[in-house]
Image (cartoon, helix red, strand yellow):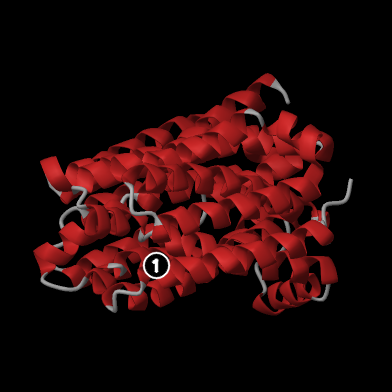
């Protein structure tokens, strides 16, 4: 990569860091939000599901927009919008308005990480892409860790509104720095100069992508991954609070270990890939996620549950980065649209998983739900390991 592209990647990393922090900041807040607004934990989880649904659906808009006007330009606008919506969310006086604010944040954040992945796909050869995407993953995992920790800390010590105020400031900072890069012409090469947007043409393009067996395969397993892994992740802090008596701050701190596992993978991505290959990463990753979920479901000692958080994070990112890399290559002729379809399915799957898991929380069935998710991850890992779709 050129020097300017490397600088852009670092700034994209800041935007992606904040985006992921915003995505996961509500996980350790659910119990506190339920208490403040006098609802159940499952009902409070609407703030997580709303973000995920908006994030997923809006991919259908950002994909073609990024292909047409330039991926980095869209990332800048999306980051700026996140800053504005995060500030408004901090002022929400009711759960309904909080959910609406989270919906707006999810809709805006949808244009950051997926188009950043697509931009990397345009800039980096496939042989180097796994490692480069792992650098972006290091930023997103760090953001997840910061969001989960700070969400719990703020809910307990500062008030949950403070968390959204801090996120707003970070989004606005990232947007300003990225704007300077884009204004310098860095994204010009990626800007589209075609005719006016045509809905019919776009739908034909999406249909063309879905007609490819490789695309359908990657999107299908990604939706299942989102439901099984991300759908349960949102309720791990609630499990720590209700089952082990943790405070919101302590539960958020424990969840940092999920991110530590992912960060460990991202920092050693090349070594893991050389050692296990794509098939081995998928199978090993799914097995580790399953082990972590089972520990979280049935362990009676805190130490084993804490270990489950770490193991789940390491395994998830082994599996997910493999699918993520395949997504950048499943349709190179329309990479922006293809990668955002990938993100769409991931987060629509997550929203379904959150809704299903929320019902189990209010009925005291979280442990059995974690167990079902663990078994599903084992099946998913076996399927992905037998049919890797990345092509060099």
Q: Quadrant of residue 68?
A: bottom right
Residue at 57% across / 60% down in the picture? 62
Give left or right: position of 132 versus 94: right
Report the quarter where the C terminus lies. top right
Taking the view exactly as shown, the residue that stands out farthest to the top is 3
Report the quarter where the N terminus lies. top right
Q: In front: 290, or 318?
A: 290
Disc 1 secondary structure class = helix
Q: Is residue 59 among the parts visible in the rendering?
A: no
Q: Quadrant of residue 277?
A: top right
Q: Position of residue 7 (x, y in %)?
A: 58, 24
Give left or right: position of 85 versus 114: left
Residue to which mark 1 is pinned: 367
Give left or right: position of 339 versus 144: right
Residue at 28% across / 59% down in the picture? 238
Q: Position of residue 188 (x, y in %)?
A: 67, 39
Q: Position of residue 330 (x, y in %)?
A: 80, 58
How many badges with numbers are in the image? Answer: 1
Q: In front: 284, or 97?
A: 284
Q: Position of residue 170 (x, y in %)?
A: 34, 36
Q: In front: 135, or 6?
A: 135
Residue at 20% across / 73% down in the picture? 40
Q: Is residue 269 among the parts visible in the rendering?
A: yes
Residue at 43% across / 72% down in the picture? 368
Q: In front: 281, or 208?
A: 281
Taking the view exactly as shown, the residue that stands out farthest to the front is 300
């Amino acid at each position: 990569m050129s020097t300017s592209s490397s600088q852009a990647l670092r700034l994209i990393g800041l935007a992606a860091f904040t985006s992921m922090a915003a995505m996961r900041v509500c996980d350790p807040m659910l119990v506190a939000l339920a208490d403040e607004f006098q609802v159940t934990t499952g009902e409070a989880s609407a703030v997580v599901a709303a973000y995920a649904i908006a994030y997923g659906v809006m991919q259908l808009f950002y994909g073609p927009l990024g292909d047409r006007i330039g991926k980095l330009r869209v990332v800048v606008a999306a980051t700026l919008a996140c800053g504005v919506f995060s500030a408004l969310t901090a002022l929400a006086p009711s759960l309904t308005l909080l959910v609406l604010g989270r919906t707006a944040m999810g809709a805006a954040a949808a244009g950051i990480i997926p188009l950043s992945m697509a931009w990397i796909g345009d800039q980096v050869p496939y042989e180097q892409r796994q490692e480069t995407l792992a650098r972006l993953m290091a930023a997103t995992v760090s953001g997840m860790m910061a969001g989960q920790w700070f969400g719990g800390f703020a809910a307990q010590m500062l008030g949950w509104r403070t968390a959204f105020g801090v996120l707003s400031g970070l989004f606005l900072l990232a947007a300003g720095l990225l704007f300077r890069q884009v204004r310098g012409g860095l994204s010009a090469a990626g800007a589209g100069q075609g005719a006016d947007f045509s809905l019919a043409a776009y739908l034909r393009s999406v249909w063309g992508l879905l007609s490819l067996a490789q695309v359908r395969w990657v999107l299908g397993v990604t939706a299942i991954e989102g439901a099984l892994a991300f759908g349960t992740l949102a309720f791990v802090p609630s499990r720590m609070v209700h089952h082990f008596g943790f405070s919101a701050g302590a539960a958020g701190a424990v969840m940092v270990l999920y991110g530590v596992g992912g960060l460990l993978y991202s920092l050693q991505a090349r070594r893991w890939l050389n050692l296990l290959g794509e098939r081995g990463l998928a199978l090993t990753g799914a097995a580790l996620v399953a082990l972590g979920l089972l520990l979280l479901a049935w362990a009676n000692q805190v130490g084993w549950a804490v270990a489950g958080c770490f193991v789940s994070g390491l395994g998830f990112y082994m599996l997910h980065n493999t699918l993520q890399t395949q997504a950048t290559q499943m349709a190179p002729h329309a990479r922006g649209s293809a990668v955002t379809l990938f993100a769409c399915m991931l987060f629509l799957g997550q929203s379904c998983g959150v809704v299903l898991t929320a019902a189990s929380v209010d009925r005291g069935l979280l442990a059995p739900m974690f167990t079902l998710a663990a078994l599903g991850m084992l099946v998913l890992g076996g399927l992905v390991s037998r049919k890797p779709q990345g092509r060099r």
